[in-house]
Image (cartoon, grey):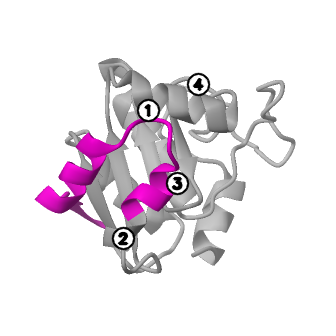
Amino acid sequence: MNIIAYGNPHPEFQDHLNSLLNQAGRASEVCVEEMDPEFTALLCAWDGASDLMDHLFPLLHDTSNTRLLLSVPDQQKYKAYCKKLTGIAEWGCCLSETIAIEFAPASRRLLVQLHETLHLFGIDDCYQPASQFPKESCDLPTCLMRYETPSSHVCKNVLRQLRHGS
């Protein structure tokens, strides 16, 4: 899978993501590429209210093997958009396993980028959205897919989903 990045992915992002994929037994590695000027122009022109996926899809021809990671700290229009769609987007969200958006403070950027990117692989959260309490299927108290955990480790359920997912 290729991930096209807008903004500044954490310097350790690609290595951490590939390590998680390796732990799950996936043979392929993820390649993170910088967003080209056409995508950048579309993002700059986005009004913050219209459907972001519809706005970007004209340039996203192959969604079977390409995903987007938008790292946009301090961009209120992305935060407002994610909160409108999900209700609890404190530092990021994922749109239809195609676009991961991160707007976290610097101290949380790597973990939020990894968390939201795992959704691009079809990975479920390990917490209940309404309460943020952990799901029973998660056997690791510090799992990255739980709400606000300070760890890049994942539970067996996440590894299983990665192994058998997209």
Residue type at tag 2: Pro
The residue positioned farthest toward the right in the image shown: 136
Q: CA distance from mark 2 to mark 3?
A: 24 Å
Q: Residues within 10 Å of mark 3 (few under 14, many from 20)?
A: many
The residue lying at 19 percent from left, 51 percent from top is 41
The residue lying at 72 percent from left, 56 percent from top is 157
Q: Nearer the viewer, mark 2 or mark 4?
A: 2
Q: Is residue 132 left or right of residue 82?
A: right
Q: Secondary structure at mark 4?
A: loop
Q: CA distance from mark 2 to mark 4?
A: 34 Å
Looking at the rendered structure, which numbered label has been put on residue 78? 1
Looking at the rendered structure, which numbered label has been put on residue 148? 4
Q: Nearer the viewer, mark 1 or mark 4?
A: 1
The residue under label 3 is 118
- Quadrant housing residue 28: bottom left
Q: Is residue 143 left or right of residue 110?
A: right
Mark with earlier residue (3, 4): 3
Q: Secondary structure at mark 1?
A: helix
Q: Are marks 2 and 4 in contact (CB under 8 Å)?
A: no
Mark with earlier residue (2, 3): 2
Q: CA distance from mark 3 to mark 4?
A: 15 Å
Residue type at tag 3: Leu
